[in-house]
Amino acid sequence: MADLPVETIQFDEPTLMLEPLEAAVVTAIRRQGPLSRTDLSERLDYSRASVTGIVGRMIDARVLTEAGEGKSAGGRRPFLLDLNPHLGYVVGVDVGATSLDVALADFRGQILERATGPGDVRGRPDDFFDRVADVVDELLARRGLPATAVIGIGVGVPGPVEFVPGVLIAPPLMPLWEGYPIKQHLRRRFPAARVAVDNDVNIMARGEHQAGAGRGLDNFLFVKIGTGIGCGIISHGEIYRGADGAAGDVGHICVDYNGPVCHCGNQGCLEIMAAGPAIAAEGRARAEAGESQFLAARLAERGTLTAVDVGDAAAAGDRAALEIIRRSGRMIGGVLATLVNFYNPQAVFIGGGVAGIGHGLLSAIRQATLRRATALSTRHLRIEYAPLGEDAGVIGGIWLALENVFVVK
Amino acid sequence: MADLPVETIQFDEPTLMLEPLEAAVVTAIRRQGPLSRTDLSERLDYSRASVTGIVGRMIDARVLTEAGEGKSAGGRRPFLLDLNPHLGYVVGVDVGATSLDVALADFRGQILERATGPGDVRGRPDDFFDRVADVVDELLARRGLPATAVIGIGVGVPGPVEFVPGVLIAPPLMPLWEGYPIKQHLRRRFPAARVAVDNDVNIMARGEHQAGAGRGLDNFLFVKIGTGIGCGIISHGEIYRGADGAAGDVGHICVDYNGPVCHCGNQGCLEIMAAGPAIAAEGRARAEAGESQFLAARLAERGTLTAVDVGDAAAAGDRAALEIIRRSGRMIGGVLATLVNFYNPQAVFIGGGVAGIGHGLLSAIRQATLRRATALSTRHLRIEYAPLGEDAGVIGGIWLALENVFVVK
């Protein structure tokens, strides 16, 4: 990779600078695929001459490449321009509470290599990110690439993030990570990379926005249901973070003032009432009370029950399991009705581990949302399982990295 | 006003076209006040030469005027540029359920003339907007201006609006107005005006954003408490409307599944439980039950009670009235806690007629919000009465008009 731009690390970050119009060219091609100079001139509303000049410079800088001929509009067939896939490589990192997903992609966002495995965020972040860097090195080695080939890294973490410095703030799952300089740590191993960090749900919403069901939508919600419940918000086509980076923290919305005490200290939070552990615990209670043969057998066999077991029971027609799932869906849908009235999104996509437990949950969520939200706010509303599934995080990480590779002057 | 630009009405609207950089100059001066060419060049990140060229053309077109000398930064004192207040005039119209406010302002947004009076939206919109036009004519006459001096009109209406066509969709208060072409009607009387229509709460949020407590904030909520309860949402510095223009419809969020039936057909909506009529009805019940001497006396005197009467009783220390107001504040605060967890705004401003009933309501709303929202989402949160009060609507209408005067190419 001797032909990669060599960056000198100055005060904080290596930078690939773009003029505003250059950045607009990159964004247009990234969103639309290959475009001709005429397409670009029309889309960006700049003269053909300005676009031709800028495109020439960007080809010289190896940001763009000629990518064959497009369709003729009567005269000569136009040359199409695409991003140079080998300008550099980016890495998406999806840190789950108990899992780690890493992918290496080219500059067009095509995944080249992937690694998935267990992870544990309760330990020291230094050790954790050393391991992340080792995994990235391994993926690079498979392609014969050096560490300096990585020009961008996008990291999703399961906790609230202050986006600009890229640090976690008061993360309940991983207190040792509070304020830990993730960017600086990764930059030590990948000195040509700009690093961006966001919370896991925002990363997944970004993945769905760029490459999943949210393509082309201006505003939607991505709700992750797993051990907890969180929500990524797309507003005006961008991730919406709120004043303190805390937007979308819907797991601690109260659904029952007299409900059980949540780890946050309040009573009756949505996630303590309706997320994966609540579904599993209720399944166990029903099994032990003799109300579900299916769950009692599964419990005897495995010694424990998960939300997925309850989903399996429901799929087999077990009544107790169906009730558990409907109850959970009703509570989630009740909160969504409130959010839909307030936010009137184009769509709500449901993802996360518990989304895998079957269609019963989705239909209960839908029913409860539609029953309690206003007619106007639901007349075009889609409520669907998120199509990228487990991949949304790592794909979102790649796109976060791609969007942060360049600094606009 | 012979020197006003003469517009020919073509297919739909008269247009004053601006290049993107010209529009950026107008926006910068509108937000910051008078600026020098050097200020503009720095703020907009364009060369001094480009800015000088464009500013010259905008002075020739009488969009900008020289506005005296600024402070020297060492050398010659720079000339400041301001918007030409006489380029044309704009009108803000705030249609309440039972009131009509109209103001005439110059091109810098300074109010020149105002009229306020009762209104009734239950009748035919034709008659209503004929009256609005008559009021505008009267204000113009006071300044000796012709109808063609009006280059922009911003209208706020109490119902859901589809913004681009500017029509009401299924407005519960005023079924006859559904789909009524407000823009076309006003344009017949003010042929040089571009007309924009938005719902009342968005208009008020815009007023607070441009000229009130929301100046410089990127995201906040404006909650109007009156006969109903609605919410204007500022996101990324702009009004957020949602997929169907229905965003902010918080009055129909459920606070009690077993509560009284709302006019929307659902049970226990926030507005049927906690808005002005609920406060007044509860005050009457307490008066009739002999639980409040103050309210019983007021009821005997006037034959009816309003939310303001209950506020007066609370201010006089009446226990029943204090309880009524705290209960209402608790319900509103409970919903706000949910919205704050979800949206993490920088501020929540409370306005509308019921906001005038005293500090007890605000402190109950604050307590309930802070008790149930997460620590992170409330650590910098301001919850305050909106400072523009009754004027927010008409001021927001003026700013809506100003922002829509030009079409950006």
Image (cartoon, coloured by chain):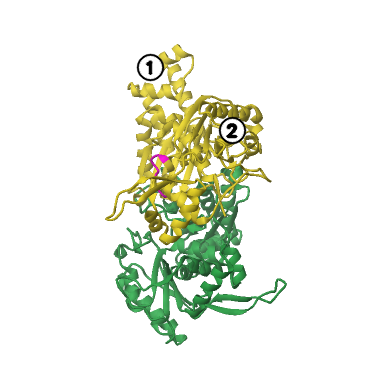
Chain colours: A green, B yellow
Does the residue at mark 2 contact the one at mark 1 (Cβ under 8 Å)?
no
Position of A190 compared to B196: left or right?
left
Query: Which residue is located at x 29 percent, y 52 percent?
Result: B72
The image quarter containing residue A190 is: bottom left
Q: For residue B294, which numbered disc appears in the image?
A: 1
Q: Please tell me whether mark 1 sits on a helix, a strand or a loop.
A: helix
Look at the image and give the residue range highlighted in magenta: B211-219
Nearer-the-camera pick, B71 or A40: B71
> Residue B388, image x and y in percent?
41, 34
User: Relative to B71, does residue A172 appear above or below in the rendering?
Assistant: below
- Crowdedness near tag 1: few (<14), some (14–19) or many (≥20) residues, C-alpha within 10 Å: many
Amino acid type for the residue under numbered disc 2:
Ala
Query: Residues at marks 2 and 1, common chain?
Result: yes
Amino acid type for the residue under numbered disc 1:
Phe
Residue with the mark numbered 2 = B147
Q: Is residue B212 magenta?
A: yes
> Residue A240, image x and y in percent?
45, 55
